[in-house]
Image (cartoon, grey):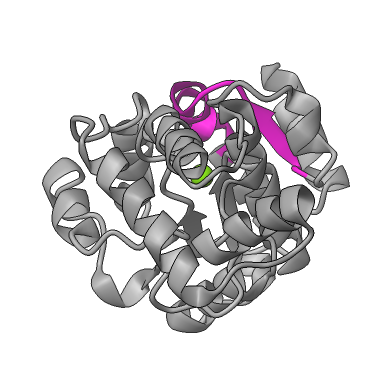
Amino acid sequence: MQQSIINNTKAQGFPQRLRAVLFDMDGVLYNSMPYHAIAWNKAMAQFGYDLPEEEVYMHEGRTGTSTVNLVSLREHGTEVSEERVAEIYKVKSDLFNQFPPAEPMPGALSLLRQLKEQGLMILIVTGSGQCSLLDKLNCDYPGIFRRELMVTAFDVKYGKPNPEPYLMGMQKGGLQPHECIVVENAPLGVHAAKAAGIFTIAVNTGPLPDKALLDEGADLLFPSMQALSDAWGELSVALDKQTKDI
Ligand code: MG
């Protein structure tokens, strides 16, 4: 495993001058996806739609509107009004908020601290629209995140799998694709990041097969944030060496 990371870096276009790491949030920084899956399943059922919990993981990263319309088109052959989407999304959010606060993902803080120590810029690119996001992040990950380096549901028009959120993240940081790495757990998130031209590390923290992430173009895959955090030292060495070789 260790050797393969180094061997793969050149072949897969590892970033040439790493300046920043862009993090997705749900399923990467927080173990929140099981709650989202249940909330989506129950909310949609209340409105007469069938959205199995496991399917929620396949749509992770989409805007609420996109998710509702995708299911409605499939089941009823038509999209739904904005008002109806808002109604469904409110039920979903209320159900989600009934759960206890999602726990930080094991390994995330230790990875973030390593990146911070290395002087790397740390950004968040999430489809989440929770108003209290920054407060929660600052509480669980003190001193790591800045509002001006976050892309949330309030910033984007299309959302993942469109590259828009990651392009916006790079814009906010004044970054080029070859200066970045993305950390994602969702197939559509990996798709968005690769479409933005960024080297993408997938962490498979959910129930989907690894193939779902690799098929979207993930450059490296780890079974957990802890595994990525543990491997980061070695990845950094590979990076430094590569930079000096140019
Ligand atoms: Mg995610």
Residue 99, position as x, y percentages in the image? 23, 31
Relative image position of residue 121 (x, y in whole percent): 39, 64
Farthest residue toward the top?
1
As for residue 234 lying within the magenta part, the answer is: yes
Is any part of residue 242 visible from this angle?
no
Residue 107 vertical placement versus 142 (above, below): above
Q: Residue 72: tell me if it is visible.
A: yes
Tell which of 37 and 89 is nearer to you.
Answer: 89
Quadrant for residue 72, please give it.
bottom right
Residue span colored magenta: 218-235
Image point 38% across, 62% down: which residue?
87
Residue at the image point whose x is 68% and y is 67% from the top: 79
Measured as percent of width and height from the top left, residue 25 is found at 41, 48
Task: Say whether residue 125 is left or right of residue 75.
Answer: left
The rendered magenta stretch, by its main secondary structure, is classed as helix
> Along the line of sight, which residue is nearer the eye, 125 or 101?
101
Q: Quadrant of residue 162?
A: bottom right
Position of 194 relative to 136 (above/below): below
Say if the magenta span includes residue 201. no
213 versus 204 height, above or below: below
Which residue is found at the position 36% from the left and 69% from the top?
A: 150
In the rendered image, the quadrant that contains the N terminus is: top right
In this picture, residue 159 sits left or right of residue 40: right
Q: Classify residue 197 by image quadrant.
A: bottom right
In this rendering, the count of numbered labels is 0
Between residue 232 and residue 46, name the one nearer to us.
46
Side (left or right) of 79 relative to 124: right
Q: Quadrant of the C terminus?
A: bottom right
| Residue 143 horizontal/vertical position (percent) | 16, 55
* Vertical side of 164 occupied by 204: above or below: above
Please name the residue shown 65% across and 34% down the image. 55
